[in-house]
Image (spheres, coloured by chain):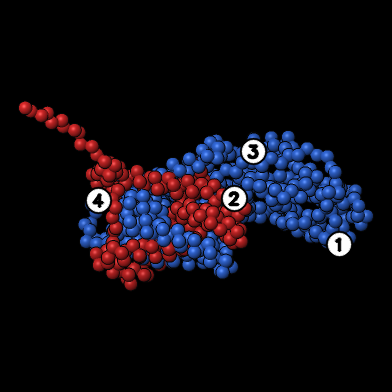
Amino acid sequence: MSPFPLPLDAMFGHAGAYFVYMLIGFAFGYVLEISGFAISTKLAAQFYFKDMTVLKVMFTAIIVAMVLIFLATGLGLLDYNLIWVNPTYLWPGIVGGLIMGVGFIVGGFCPGTSLVSAATFKIDGIFFAVGGLFGIFLFGETVQSFEAFWNSSYFGRLTLMDWLGLPTGVVVIGVVLMALFMFWGGEQLERIFGGQPQPQRSWGRRAGVATLLAGALLVALIGQPTTQDKWVRLAPEKEALLSARDVQIHPGELLASLADDQLNVILLDVRDEADYNLFHLRRARHLSLDKVTATIPDLQLEAGANTVYVVMSNDERAATEAWKLLVAESVPNVYILEGGINNWLTVFGHDDPTVQPTPTPPGNEPLQFIFASAVGDRHSAADPDAHHYELEYTPKIKLELKRGASGGGCG
Amino acid sequence: MTTAVVEEPKRRGWRAVLLGRAEKPYVNPYVGGALLGVVLFLSFFLTGNGLGASGGLNRYVVYLQDLLAPEHVDRVAYLLKMAGGDKNPLDDYLVFMTLGTLLGGFVSGWQHGRLKFETNKGPQISVRTRWLMAFVGGAIMGYGARFARGCTSGQALSGGAVLSAGSWAFMFAVFGGGYALAYFVRRLWN
């Protein structure tokens, strides 16, 4: 498993983790200040092409961080699944962005820079920060009146790679080239509108450009690990769990977990659609095996500290395949229904005489019961009453301590 | 008769310690950007989260609201998520990151002699107008940042670096909004 991001809570405790965040915040504030971001006139000059510091600092930061991040994920040091990628709410994002652009040019800051400005005693920065708090308060009070729009055009964890259909390396190179072009354009604009001298060619500048381009090329050359690569890396550790049967939960444990208000159990049924239509557990989602990988970003977004995923097939074969894919992509708390749907029906279906076990069913991993019609979840065994059953089993679900992203920079 | 004049060393008050350092120039923007990029990378690398500012501020606001009107907080879904029941809105990493940002800005400002009570403004407007505009702009910005689920740091910078499609659309919208209005408010800055 990729060692980063670190399980901060497990390593340093709750308070210790917050201390790490404070140190990161400290570095953030420090760097903003040394770049001149505490001065509103310097920030606003960006919009009159006189001083393109904002553009230069922002895009340099983005491309440097991007190259380092995708080198780290490419080398298997960092798990891209565990870092926060802002989910896309396209239109609310664009409208909010336009509003912020207006706030920027009227007020002269953005929230982060106003903090640094206020911290260095700039009075306009203090007014801006207080205004910002007021705006945030207003938003909390009015969001109810346009909640539908605010939650619209949701695309989940959509990346530029998904959107463009290009490999990560190509997108990284493209973004670096675009930023370099913008720096060149920005310097021309500064010369024309701000009367600033043409910057001299220096070795430092050449080295910077060369390093960035080389980094981006390296990202493309290394590539990003596939689900299969990730599984191969994890296999020794995780195969042991499978063979020790540490992750196959008894139907009784699943039933008890479903009835447990403290857990959010998500059922993933990976059988073919015909079997799913014949019979499935209530609230089980149908997810065919070939779609598992594509669904992982959405599952990651759903994963809370108390979310448990249970995969099931007729016996355990397909479910185990799905389990491997999910585990390889770092979905937390994934379990397999022991003995699958067949075992479930053996335990909970016996009081319905119309459901007959078939002795020698044909095919690969078949459903061993015959239903008179496709009942879906309209069957007593699809949602048994937990209070009616006293089943003996060894509980196996242990919630993992959550690692990695916890809701993004502005949650 | 002679009286010995004891030369007392010049005591420097807190004002001198805080505000008296010689002002140093800012770093080259590309160097500043590269350092910011490294900080942003370390944030993702160590914690899985990017940088943020408005989310922390948000939680300070909700904390105050929860102190003053807890029943109201319990009725609004958006606030409920952060402060419903016995949830403490300050129990969040962003609150500490924001605190760190303030400290970092302050320390750098002190170290480089840039702590100064001053109002930066364009030459054609009064200090009071600048204050008013800063407040109004801040309110618009705060509102927009929550609307877009993130500010320049949390969306544009952090989402941009991990190549979130929505964050890139957002980033161009911010610059678009600024540039579209810049001409009409040019008196504020020029």
Q: Quadrant of the C terminus of chain B?
A: bottom left
Percent position (x, y) of residue A353?
Answer: 93, 55
The numbered disc on residue A201 is 4
Which residue in the structure is indicated by mark 2?
B87
Numbered badge on residue A138: none
In the foreground, A256 or B107: B107
**Disc 1 target residue:** A373
Q: Disc 1 vs disc 2: which is toward the camera? A: 2
Residue lying at 16% horizontally and 32% vertically, measured from the top left: B7
Residue shown at the point (92%, 57%) measured from the top left: A354
Q: Is residue A218 left or right of residue B32?
A: right
Separation (CA) of disc 4 from disc 2:
56 Å
Q: CA distance from mark 3 to mark 2?
A: 39 Å
Q: In which chain is the residue bearing label 3? A: A
**Which comes before the other along the chain, label 3 or label 4?**
4
Q: Tell me, yes or no, whether the two marked residues, 3 and 4, touch with CB atoms within 8 Å.
A: no
Q: Identify the residue at image location x=43%, y=65%.
A: B140
Total numbered labels placed on residues in the image: 4
Kindly check if marks 1 and 2 are in contact, taking CB atoms under 8 A apart as contact: no
Q: Chain B's shade in the image? A: red
How far is mark 1 from mark 4, CA to CA?
78 Å
Badge 1 element: loop
Residue A182 visible in this rendered orientation of the protein:
no
The local crowd at label 3, few if under 14, some if 14 to 19, many if 20 or more residues have their Cα within 10 Å, is some
Q: Are marks 1 and 4 in contact (CB under 8 Å)?
A: no
Q: Colour of chain A?
A: blue
Mark 1 is surrounded, within 10 Å at the Cα level, by few (under 14), some (14 to 19) or many (20 or more) other residues, namely few
Which residue is label 3 attached to? A235
